[in-house]
Amino acid sequence: MGSATVFRHRRPNVTQKQTLTVRDNRTGDEYELDITDGTIRASDVGKIGKTGEEPGLAVYDPGFTNTASTRSAVTYIDGDRGILEYRGYPIEQLAESSTFLEVAYLLIHGELPTKEQHDQWVHEITFHTFVHENLKSLMQGFRYDAHPMGMLLSSVGALSTFYPEARNIKDPQVRHEQIVRLIAKMPTLGAWSFRHAQGKPYVYPDNDLTYTENFLSMLFRMSESKYEPDPRLSKALEVLFILHADHEQNCSTNAVRSVGSSQVDPYSAVSAGIAALYGPLHGGANEAVLRMLKRIKTKDNVPAFIEGVKNGDERLMGFGHRVYKNYDPRAKIIKKATEDVFEVTGVNPLLEVAQELEKIALEDEYFVSRKLYPNVDFYSGLIYEALQFPPEMFTVLFAIPRTAGWLAQWLELVDDPEQKIARPKQIYTGERQLDFIPAAQRWS
Ligand SMILES: CC(C)(COP(=O)(O)OP(=O)(O)OC[C@H]1O[C@@H](n2cnc3c(N)ncnc32)[C@H](O)[C@@H]1OP(=O)(O)O)[C@@H](O)C(=O)NCCC(=O)NCCS
C-alpha cells in the first residue's frame, strides 16, 4: 500500500479551537475531533464513516512510526535539540554525578531517593543478586557455544517459574519484590552467560561490592580470594549503564508493554524485551561499528572509506539516528568514558580510526547537511572490546541496565487505567470464503 498525498487546503477562517475537522468525501459528512497533546484519538477516527453494517475508519501505521501508544512520564526525548531526560533530569547530569542504582530508583519511583530510601534500595538489590541453584543448572545445560543473549532471554523467562507469586501484578508489594529481583539478578545471569561460552566456572555475587563492581567480579574473577576491579572501569560501566537505562517507546520497551498488557508476570514481559533487543536492528549497531573499524584498519584508509559512503556504497555505522537529528547527547558522554577506559586497558588502535572518521564526517557537507552525527553506538563498541567482551556480549550489556527502564514502563502500564490488552487492527488482504476440498479429492 503506497502512501497517498495529503492535500492541504488553506482557509481563512482560523479559530483557536483544539480540534480537527474532517470531511468524509465518500459521504459528505463532516466530523470534529478533539486534539489533545498534539494527538487525535484513534477511537475518534473509528467513528468516521461508522454505520450499523460498516466499521469506521482506522489508521494504518506499520511500525507505529506516528502512533502514540501511551501517555508516559518516564523519559523525555527531543531529537531535534539533542535532549534526553529521565523523569525530567538531563542525562548529562545523571551520567556525571549519579550512580546506576540511583537512576534505576528514579526511573522506577519517579523521584530521587532520600538517603534512607537510597540505602534501603541498594541493600535490597544487593541482597537479591543470588539465583536459585536450579537456575544455574538450567544455564549449564546450554551448548558450549550458546549465544549469551539466548541464555539471558531464557533464564529471565525461567525466573517466573521460581517466583509464581509474581503473576499477582495487582499487588504493589509483590511488584516491588519482582522489580528488585530482576534488577539484582540481571548482572548475575548476564555474567554467567558470558562465563559459559568461555568454559569458565560461574562466579557467585560478592555483596560487598557495588552493582557494577560486582558485575565485573562475576565476569572476570578467577582464583583471587577478593576481586578488586579498577575504579575507573566500574565508573565507566556505571556511566554506560546510566546512558542505556531507558529510551522511551523503542522496540524492546514496546515489546515489554505489549506482552505486559496481557497481565503476564514481569519476568515474562522483560524476557520479551530481551528478545526484541536481540535483533540486529535494535541492539546490534555497536557490533557493526566495530566490524567497520576493523575493516578500515588504519587512519590512512579513512578518506577513501568516507568517499565510498558518500557515493552510497555503504553507511557510516554509528552515525545518524531516527530520533536525534542534532546530536545524540549520549555520544558525547560515552566519548569521555572511552578515554577513561583506555587509560586502564591501553589505547585500542581502532580509536584512532574512529576519531579520524568522526573528525572528517563532522566537517563534511554530506554528513552536515543530512544532520548525521555520532550516536551512542559509535564509541560503546570500542569500550566493550577494550574490556575484552566478544561482540555477542554487547547486547547483554545493553539489556542489564535497560531492565530498569523496562520495569519503570511496565509499572506505568500496570497502573494506567486507560491501557488495554494490546491488539492492533489489520487490513486483511487474503482470500475469502473458499470451498474446502478434502485432501483425498485434491490429490487424486
Ligand atoms: C540510524 C538510521 C537507521 C536512521 O535512519 P533514518 O532516520 O531513517 O534516516 P534515513 O535512512 O532516511 O537517512 C537520511 C539520509 O542520510 C543518509 N544517511 C543516514 N545515515 C547514514 C549513515 N550512517 N551513513 C551515511 N549516510 C547516511 C541516507 O542515505 C539519507 O541520504 P539521502 O537523503 O541522500 O537519501 C541511519 O542513520 C543509519 O543507518 N545509521 C547507521 C546505523 C546505526 O548507527 N544505527 C544505530 C542507531 S542508534
Image (cartoon, rainbow, N blue to C red):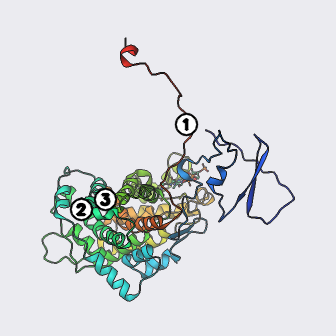
For the residue pair 324 and 298, the one nearer the viewer reads as 324
Where is residue 227? Give x, y as percent: 19, 76
**What residue is disc 3 on?**
393
Mark 2 Cα-neighbour bin, 10 Å: few <14, some 14–19, many ≥20: few
Three-letter code for the amino acid on which mark 2 is drawn = Phe
Point out which mark residue 428 bears: 1
Q: Is residue 168 left or right of residue 88?
A: left
Mark 3 Cα-neighbour bin, 10 Å: few <14, some 14–19, many ≥20: many
Mark pair 1, 3: CA separation: 40 Å
Q: Is residue 231 left or right of residue 422?
A: left
Identified at 83% across, 54% down, the residue is 10
For the residue pair 221 and 167, the one nearer the viewer reads as 167
Mark pair 1, 2: CA separation: 41 Å
Point out which mark residue 162 bears: 2
Q: What secondary structure is found at the residue carrying circle 3?
A: helix
Q: In this view, does 204 lie to the left or right of 56?
A: left
Where is residue 377? Give x, y as percent: 44, 61
Query: Of callouts 1 and 3, which one flags the residue occurring earlier in the amino acid sequence?
Result: 3
